[in-house]
Amino acid sequence: MNKLNKGMNQNREMNQVNIDEKSLLEVMIDASQKDTCWPGCVDQWRPENRPWGHCAMYALEYDSALEEEGVTERSIAQCQAVTPQGSFLHLVNIVSGKIMDMSGSQFKDGVSYEDVKPITRDELLAWPDREAERYALFHQRVYELRKQRGI
């Protein structure tokens, strides 16, 4: 995969994944706080754009939800998100060979993806910018919100 364009709802066959993605996304947005934002984006994080700097958190959480559903054709991928404002390191999910970007709404002016390369959960969680610590906090928030909302 070299260059792909965003389109969350058109990126894969809906019958392959049995997850209430809208509810999961709402929970992830509500769980997004400054303390779980990637350290390089924390100064730009605002409550009005809660997904900002949370691509790793969303990719890990969506991967966990897919695993719970028994989806085997899935991975997390590292890529360059290309926007009118520039190119950024970004993380997405690959489901049945297609990009799923749960945090794509942070890019208000659209995004395309280049240099898409799979990365394992363990590799991502081992990154030196507190990924594992931030994800543990984020995952706990998501868990509590899902439990409260019956999702």
Image (spheres, rainbow, N blue to C red):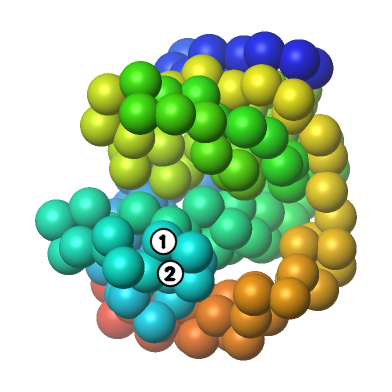
Mark 2 surroundings within 10 Å by alpha-carbon count, few (fewer than 14), some (14 through 19), many (20 or more): many
> In front here: 107 or 10?
107
| Residue 41 tag number | 1
- Residue occupying the far left of the picture: 48
Location of mark 2 (residue): 37
Circles 1 and 2: CB distance less than 8 Å?
yes
Q: Quadrant of the N terminus?
A: top right
Q: Quadrant of the C terminus?
A: bottom left
Mark 1 surroundings within 10 Å by alpha-carbon count, few (fewer than 14), some (14 through 19), many (20 or more): few
- The image quarter in which residue 50 lies: bottom left
SS category of the residue bearing label 2: loop
- The image quarter in which residue 72 lies: top right
> In front here: 85 or 107?
85
Q: Decide: is 12 above or below 17.
A: above
Residue drawn where x is 83% and y is 48% of the image: 119
| Left or right: where 13 falls relative to 110 | right
Across and down, in percent, residue 35 comes to 39, 82
SS category of the residue bearing label 1: loop
> In front here: 86 or 126?
86
> Mark 2 belongs to which amino acid?
Cys
Is residue 151 visible to us here?
Answer: no
Q: Decide: is 15 above or below 36.
A: above
> In front here: 112 or 63?
112
Is residue 140 visible to us here?
Answer: yes
Separation (CA) of disc 1 from disc 2: 7 Å
| Left or right: where 60 falls relative to 151 | right
Across and down, in percent, residue 116 comes to 74, 28
Across and down, in percent, residue 19 comes to 51, 46
Residue drawn where x is 17% and y is 64% of the image: 47
Across and down, in percent, residue 49 comes to 22, 53
